[in-house]
Structure formats: C-alpha cells, structure tokens
Amino acid sequence: MVAMSRSSSSTDSVNLLEVGRIDKPHGVRGDVVVALTTTETHRVAPGTHLFAGEREFVITASRPHQHRWIVTFEGVYGREGAEAISGLVLSAEPLDDDPDALWVHELIGSTVVETDGTERGTVLAVQDNPASDLLVLDSGALVPLRFLEGRDEENRLVVEVPDGLFELLDED
C-alpha cells in the first residue's frame, strides 16, 4: 500500500509530509479551496492541524467540492485573508496506523530490482495513474506499483513484473 498523507501538531518540517495545497479563495468569508495530494481525506476534517512552513492552521470546517475541498481555517477571515494564504503547500505529520505503508517520499531515490536480482533503475518520481500509480525510473521504465513486492535486505524495491515489461528498454 502506498499512502500519500501526513498529520499532527509538530512543526518539525523534516518530519512533515505534504498533504495538499491551498488553490484559491472561495467566496468572501475566508474559505479556501484545497487540493489534496493525499488519499487520506480525513486530513481536512475539522480539528485537524496542518502546517505551511512554520505557520500552523486549524481546520474549523470542510466539505467536498469538485474533487477538491472547501476549507475554513481558524483565524482566516474575509476574501483578503484567504487570498493571503493562496498557493501555500500544506503539510502534516505521518500517520502511524499502518507500519507496512510505503510513502512516496520514501520511494524516491530507491533502487528497483526484479525478483531475480536484476537492477532496473532508480525511482525518480511516482506518477499518478488511474489504473495503478507508476514508479518512474531513471532508465525510462514505468513500473506499476501493483507489481511492487516490498523491500529486500539491502532496502531495494523488489518488483515482480510480467514478461516483456522491460524488453523494449533492453533493445535500445
């Protein structure tokens, strides 16, 4: 399972994970539109603490809106207040509820190997894809996350892929 989320009350930015972005103001009362970068929608639940740099935000209300969320933050009033925080990246502490969860930031830079030990490259990014998120490798390969078996004793990502997935790259 790959989780894409964060939450809690620490401002130690080293431990915080990106959970979303404030896109724009919504209306005139201080509400903002938040686009989540996490699958964990409870990150915008009332009472949640989020961070943008050293600034802490507490959510007082939220509701879904066109694949995003309309959020009210404590202390943000009027259209001007909402405009002042537009564009901020929101972070929160990692969730501790799933010890087997793999976080996107932990995958970046990892070496990918097949079950037989053949190295296939280093993860440059994780690309969102409706069928299965994709590991984007420096070799040019795209590996669906559903083929990820886990990590080996050398902390490399082990994948079991169908025959032919890497053949086009091997021919170049």
Image: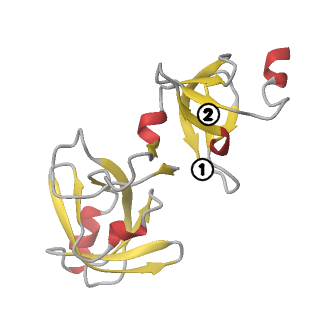
| Mark sitting on residue 38 | none
Q: Is residue 41 left or right of residue 93?
A: right
In the image, what residue type sits under mark 2?
A: Val
Is any part of residue 136 visible from this angle? yes
The answer, for residue 172, to whether it is visible in the render is no
Q: Is residue 164 left or right of residue 105?
A: right
Instruction: Check whether the beta carbons of the residues at disc 2 and disc 1 lie within 8 A of each other.
Output: no
If you read the primary sequence from the N terminus, does the residue marked by circle 2 or circle 1 appear first? 1
Residue at 22%, 58% in the rendered image: 8
- Amino acid of disc 1: Asp
Q: Nearer the viewer, residue 39 or 34?
A: 39
Q: Residue 144 at x, y = what percent?
A: 68, 42
Asked whether 15 or 162 is in front, the reply is 162
Quadrant in which residue 161 is drawn? top right
Which residue: 52% across, 24% down?
A: 156
Residue assigned mark 1 = 128
Q: Residue at x 44, y 64 (%)?
A: 35
| The C terminus: image quadrant | top right
Label 2 belongs to which residue?
136
Residue closest to the eye, 48 or 54: 48
Name which quarter of the figure residue 124 lies in: top right
In x, y percent, where is residue 60?
A: 22, 79
Question: As displayed, is residue 83 above or below residue 46?
Answer: above
At 55% from the left and 40% from the top, the residue drawn is 126
Q: Secondary structure at mark 2?
A: strand
Query: Residue 134: x, y in percent?
Result: 64, 42
